[in-house]
Image: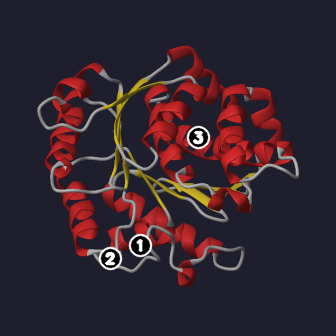
Amino acid sequence: MFKEMLENVRERCPLIHNITNYVTVNDCANILLACGGSPIMSDDIGEVEDITSICGGLNINIGTLNSRTIPAMLAAGKKANELGHPVLLDPVGAGASALRTDTALKLLDEVKFTVIRGNISEIKTLAAGSGTTKGVDADSADRVDEENLERVCDFVKSFAAKIGAVIAVTGAIDIVADGEKAYCIFNGHPMMSCVTGTGCQLSAMTAAYVTANPENVLEAAAAAVCVMGVCGEIAHERLSERDGNSSYRNYIIDAVYNLSGGILEKRARYKVL
């Protein structure tokens, strides 16, 4: 099924409106082009409703949050809801400051999200209404591993059912779940944590996948997460001894661009709980 999700993105070329992180905005645009989508980056309150209206999906990322863009996020989200477009939230750093936490919770309260993608600490913050993170990284106390995987899956499924969205938790083991089923994905490479913005790129790409596959949101989100992990592995295999994290970033985008459905199916490592 992941192969079909990938091929639909390439065939349908979804146009995605991104209100996203200034640190990674260029990489988010490039990853959308690489996977077969098309990006628009717009965060001014004067045009976000118009831009969302011509796009198929919306990606909201609070990574470089400021008071100017918060109203734009809300306006774009509400417009997307009105039009029935899928909306993704990336609550970067929720729990690290009152502004981030309060904004993420306000967005969650006023906008209906199709997918929420974050690390486990960010997702726990949304579920509890407060939390702690290590900057924009997950708190080490929240680490997901084989020992607590089933328990974390139960939590994620419960939260997904409560808010009516697919929840994608990314980390050493990725979990993508709705209220009934969780995909546990084991692809990826530790070096991905040395590149700023792999999570932001994944959020943009996930928005494209769910926009191109509206009838299979859970599987589309899981496919996007799996694609990123597989491409992280492929990119690492390409590194020479003279390459570093800058080359690795570019190789990840190259891998997404060149990935076939057949290779994705062959390399995907996951189980369903």
Q: CA distance from mark 2 to mark 3?
A: 27 Å
Q: Secondary structure at mark 3?
A: helix
Q: Amino acid at mark 1?
A: Lys
* In the image: residue 75, left or right of residue 93: left
Residue 224, numbered label: 3
Q: Residue 170 placed where, x, y %?
A: 56, 59
CA–CA distance between discs 3 and 1?
22 Å
Instruction: Locate residue 123 relative to residue 51 in the image: left or right.
Output: right
Name the one closer to the observer, 51 or 85: 51
Residue in the picture at 83% in, 46% down: 239
Quote the CA–CA distance across marks 2 and 1: 6 Å
User: Can you tell which mark lies on residue 124?
Assistant: 1
Q: Residue at x 44, y 72 (%)?
A: 135
Give the labeled residue for mark 2: 128
Q: Is residue 146 left or right of residue 27?
A: right
Q: Quadrant of residue 55?
A: top left
Q: x, y percentage for residue 105? A: 24, 64
Given contact means CB atoms under 8 Å apart, are the residues at marks 3 and 1 in contact? no
- Image quadrant of residue 153? bottom right
Q: Amino acid at mark 2?
A: Ala
**Image quadrant in which the C terminus is located:** bottom right
Q: Dot 1 surroundings within 10 Å: few (below 14), some, or many (20 or more)?
A: many
